[in-house]
Image: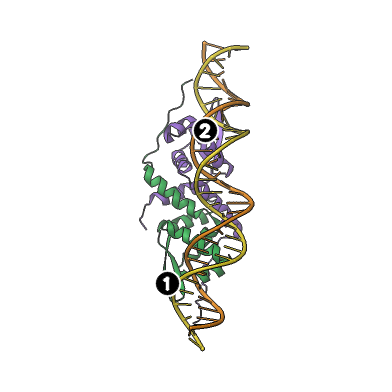
Chain colours: A green, B purple, C orange, D yellow
Amino acid sequence: MARPAAVPPAQPLTRDMLTRAAEMIKCLGHPLRLRLVEGLEAGELSVTALQEYTGAPQAQVSQQLAALKARGIVDCRRDGAFVYYRITEPRVHSILNCVRACDRP
Amino acid sequence: MARPAAVPPAQPLTRDMLTRAAEMIKCLGHPLRLRLVEGLEAGELSVTALQEYTGAPQAQVSQQLAALKARGIVDCRRDGAFVYYRITEPRVHSILNCVRACDRP
DNA sequence: ACAGAAGATGGTAATATATATATATTGTAA
DNA sequence: TTACAATATATATATATTACCATCTTCTGT
C-alpha cells in the first residue's frame, strides 16, 4: 500500500530557533527552577526571599538561579548584601500561564 | 539592616502540579521531541512521516515518541503497518505558541 | 578589624539522559 | 511462507544533571 504523505506543517521553527527554544524550555523543566520563576513572576526577589518561598536549601537555590541566568531566563542585580533576581525572558510569563491552564484545552 | 520580606506570589501551583508540569515541560525541552510535537500540531502523522519531517534516524524517532507517550503528551493508534501519533496534552499547543512568540513580550 | 549574614562556587557520588547500533516485532503483499 | 516495510525495543557507551556538603567571597554593622 502507498504510504501516507508527510504533511509538513507550515512554518516550522528553524533549527536554530528550535535548539534555543528547547534549551529554554528544558531549563524550565525542573521543579525548583519552575518554582523560582513562579516566585519571580510578580517582580524581583532576593535569594533569601526565594529560599523562604521555595523552602529549598541555599546552595540549591543559588545553583538553579545560576542555571536560569546562564540561559538568559533571569538576571540579577546586587544591592548591598542582597542580590535580587528578576525574569528577563518575556516568554516565561506566557509559558507559566500555559502551565497553569491545567488540562483545559 | 532588616532583610526584605518574602512576597509570596498569589496562587502558586501545588507541589504536585508543579512536579507534573515540570516533567511535561522537561520532556518538551529536547530538540527532536520539540520538533516532533511541532510536526504533530496540525494533526496525526505516522512514524515514517515524522522521520521524513525531522530527518532523524528511525530508532531515535521511535524512542523520543515513546518518551512523549510515556508522559501522556502524545498517544498513538495503529492502522495496518503504520502507527499514527497525535498530541493528547492540550497545553502543548499553547506552549508552542509561546515559544514561537520569539523575544516579543 | 572582626563577626556574622548573604550568596556563590567547587567537588563528588548517584542518577538520568542522549545517541548509536543491533535486533526484535508486527503487518502486508506476493 | 517468504520477503520486506514499519515500528519498537534492547543494550552499550558517553555525557549531563542532581543533590549535597563544605568552603569561599562579599558585604554590613559594630
- Residue A37 can be seen in this image: no
* Residue at image point 41% right, 45% down: A18
Which residue is denoted by mark 1 in the rendering?
A: A78
Which residue is denoted by mark 2 in the rendering?
A: B59
- Residue A1 can be seen in this image: yes
Residue B52 or residue A48, whichever sits in front: A48
Residue A54 quadrant: bottom right
**Amino acid of disc 2:** Ala
Residue D14 or residue B15, whichever sits in front: D14
A76 relative position to B75: left or right: left
Measured as percent of width and height from the top left, residue A82 is found at: 46, 73
* Residue at image point 45% right, 50% down: A23
Q: Chain of mark 2?
A: B
* Residue at image point 51% right, 59% down: A33
Whether labels 2 and 1 share one chain: no
Determine whether the residue tagged by mark 2 lies in a helix, strand or loop: helix
Is A102 drawn above or below residue C29 in the view shown?
below
Inter-mark Cα distance, 2 to 1: 48 Å
**Amino acid of disc 1:** Arg
Is B55 drawn above or below residue B7 in the view shown?
above
Determine whether the residue tagged by mark 1 lies in a helix, strand or loop: strand
Measured as percent of width and height from the top left, residue B47 is found at: 50, 32
Residue B14 or residue A103, whichever sits in front: B14
